Image (cartoon, rainbow, N blue to C red):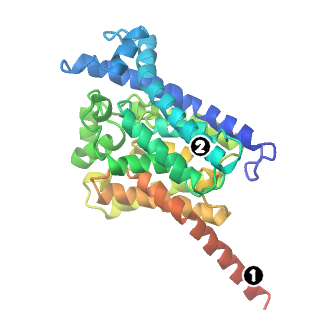
Amino acid sequence: MNLLRPNPGNGRQRMLQLQLLALLPVSIAALVNTGYQYLVAVAQDSTFSTDDFRSRLARGLGANHESLGLYDMLAAGFAHLVPILALALLVGGFWERIIAERRHTPMQPGFILVALLFTLLLPGAAAFGHVVFGMSFAMLVGRGIFGGEGKTFLNPALLGIAIVQVSFPGAADQHPLWNGLAGYAGSDAIAVYHRGGEAALSAIDIDLWSAFIGSTSGAMGTTSILAVLLGAALLLIERLIAWRLLIAQILGLFVFATLFNLLGTGAGASAMPAYWHLLLGSFAFGAVFLACDPVASACTNPGRWIQGFLIAALVVLIRVANPTHPDAVIPALLLASILAPLIDHLVIAWNIRGRSRRHV
């Protein structure tokens, strides 16, 4: 199958269905791992409250707080992920209907994808007020004011999670599902590497395998690289994402991480090998499901290479230079998405100038 050309059989509705299908492995991994992190947190912390809404729902679904069985993890994960997703869908559907009525246009189902992406970028302990705020911002600013589905130049879910991080910094940092009593993941793991390198990761039982399969804490949909790879394979086979952009991000990550390894101080994140940059944090999830969003990425082939290397450079640079934002993926993707139209403009202008010179 030729991955170089877009698939003419992918209409808008089919594209949405395939994107949701690609997120299915990530969603299942999020259910299992969030439930696992919750049950381990309850077992390790005697002060952990099990009287909140999510804990009562988990018990109502039959989760045994003293067991780590598959059903117990699924039930506990369901109690954390599904209420957030349901609220995000409710808020997204509400604003989609309001916008459609104001413009006298039919409702577009794309808000379902926005709600799912937004949910997977949140920790299992996310406050419902933050969900309403972030999803409303995603629908109104990230989607509505640009004309709706397919007309925005930023990924609405990316914009929604960015405004939540900016508006409520550290709001969930003290919750066991976020800071990881059973280990660290995401921004926490990178912060741990800042302080003590690989020895510090080993001390909290993080190795390459656990980081790959996603058995550590963090934003619900970003911890399992294996699940992300399964989704990426489907999107590549169906030609829904640009392979150049995806490869450029991975190559760029290894190039710039290696440069910092060679030129850095030999300590902290500057010494972090490229494979840890890939496995820790939300880089893999963001590279596949956010950066490769057609509306938020460059349209020209050279532009895709440039944007991919730019994303990787920003991620590594921010991780190394700014320990207060150890993950760096969300701001890097947001900036690269904003610059995507400019990158395409410069590439096209360069090509026009080159052709003009050849024909003079």
Q: Which residue is mark 2?
A: 98
Q: Which quadrant of the rendered structure holds the C terminus?
A: bottom right
Dot 2 amino acid type? Ile
Q: Secondary structure at mark 1?
A: helix
**Relative to 357, 96 lies left or right:** left
Q: Which residue is mark 1?
A: 355
Which residue is situated farthest in the bottom direction here?
A: 360
**Relative to 93, 217 lies left or right:** left
Q: Nearer the viewer, residue 89 or 101?
A: 101
Q: Is residue 291 visible?
A: no
Q: Could you tell me how far apart the alpha carbons at marks 2 and 1 are, in whole angstroms?
A: 48 Å
Q: Which quadrant of the rendered structure holds the N terminus?
A: top right
Dot 1 amino acid type? Arg
Mark 2 vs mark 1: in front: 2
**Residue placed at 66% from the left, 41% from the top?**
235
Q: Nearer the viewer, residue 203 or 11?
A: 11
**Residue placed at 59% from the left, 50% from the top?**
292
Compared to 150, does 80 lie above or below? above
**Residue placed at 25% from the left, 40% from the top?**
199
Q: Is residue 301 visible?
A: yes
**Relative to 257, 252 lies left or right:** right
> In the image, residue 116 lies at what x, y percent?
54, 35
Closer to the chain start, of discs 2 and 1, is: 2
> In the image, residue 22 lies at what x, y percent?
62, 35
> Residue 219 is drawn in which quadrant?
top left
**Relative to 325, 339 lies left or right:** right
**Residue placed at 73% from the left, 43% from the top?**
12
> In the image, residue 290 lies at what x, y percent?
54, 48
The residue carrying pointer 1 sits among few (fewer than 14), some (14 to 19) or many (20 or more) residues within 10 Å by Cα, namely: few
Compared to 81, does 174 lie above or below? below
Q: Secondary structure at mark 2?
A: helix
> In the image, residue 110 lies at what x, y percent?
63, 41
